[in-house]
Every structure is written in structure tokens, then in C-alpha cells.
Amino acid sequence: MTDNRVPPPYAGDERTMLNNWLEWHRGTLIMKCEGLTEEQLRERSAPPSTLSLLGLLRHMAHVERAWFRHVLNDEDIPRLWGKDTRQDADFDDVDTASAEEAFAVWQEEVEIARKLSAALPMEAIGKRQRNGEDVTHRWVLVHMIEEYARHNGHADLIRERVDGVVGD
């Protein structure tokens, strides 16, 4: 795996730290998927789990869209990958899914998220509530770091199972 990630700084203001850690984790997921065939990206972790690297990539595209575009920006957009009707479609429906499409959609959602995030102060309140409560931009950034970190742990294990490659 080629590691093109820029390590987060050891010191910086809150926005710099949160943005850099989020970028680190975005880069980690892509690094875990790098160099694999479509079939390898579809390979499941271990039964009964439906986790795969392709599923994780699709899931994170959905998460980027949901938090930045739906909650923070109030865009009326459909959920990705059929999640409107099946909660785990992003994970479950990878047997015929296109890795190229998943990477492109993920990249597009990340670019949109970066632009929306850059335009908002940290204390900005999302335009849609979550579970009846206001959500701040700060909370979304922290949650995104947590979401990527958790799933990057899954990606670590899946990648090692697929081809034996390990690394952070």
C-alpha cells in the first residue's frame, strides 16, 4: 500500500485538528482499498458478517452524504445504494456493485462535504435535527472521525484477510 496521507499536526486550532484527523481517516480507508481487484474488494470479512471493503466504502459515501448534505445543509436527496428501503444495502448488495462507481461516488461526496464544511463555523447548527435534537458542525466532524476510525479498524482486518497486507 502506498501511504500518501499527511499526518495531522501535533498542535493547531480546533478546526485544523478536526479537519486534518478527518482527512487522515478518509485517506486510511482509501489506502486499505488500494491495489485490490473488484473481487477482493467484495470479499466478506467472516460469516455471518456482510462487511467488505467495498461495502465500507459505499457506507462511508452514504455517511458523508447523510451528515453533511442532509443534516447540515438540508438537501432533499435520496439515500445511496437503496438504503431508503433496506438499511444495510450498502454492505449487503456488493456482489454485483461497481467498485469504480463506489470510489467515484465516495470522492464526490467527500468533495461536497469539504466545501460545505469549509463554509460553516464550528458552532453552526445543522438545518435538520437528528432524533429531535440540534446537531452542530463540530459534532458532525467529531462523529465523522469516530465513524471512519471504527470502520478503518474493520478495514484493517478485512485487508489482512484478503491479501495479508497490514499497516495503519
Image: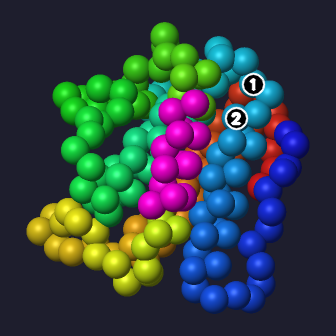
Badge 2 crowding class, 10 Å Cα cut-off, few under 14, some 14 to 19, many 20 or more, is many
Helix, strand or loop status at disc 2? helix
How far across and how far down the image is residue 69, in percent? 35, 52
For the point 43% across and 80% down, the residue is: 121
How far across and how far down the image is residue 31, in percent? 75, 43
Give the camera-side residue of 72 and 53.
72
Q: Are marks 1 and 2 in contact (CB under 8 Å)?
A: yes
Badge 1 crowding class, 10 Å Cα cut-off, few under 14, some 14 to 19, many 20 or more, is some
- What secondary structure prevails in the magenta region? helix
How far across and how far down the image is residue 133, in percent? 17, 73
Task: Tell me where residue 59 sits by quadrant.
Answer: top left
Do we see residue 146 in this rendering? no
Is residue 122 highlighted in magenta? Answer: no
* Residue type highlighted by circle 2: Cys
- The residues bearing labels 1 and 2 have C-alpha atoms spaced at a distance of 6 Å
Q: Please say if 71 is above or below 120.
A: above
Position of the N terminus by quadrant? top right
Which residue in the protein does label 2 denote? 33
Give the camera-side residue of 107 and 9.
107
**Disc assigned to residue 36:** 1
Helix, strand or loop status at disc 1? loop
Residue stretch in magenta = 104-116
For the point 80% across and 68% down, the residue is: 7
Q: Please say if 160 is above or below 127.
A: above
For the point 70% across and 51% down, the residue is: 28
Query: How was the colour assigned to the protein in this rendering?
Result: rainbow
Position of the C terminus by quadrant? bottom right
For the point 34% across and 78% down, the residue is: 124
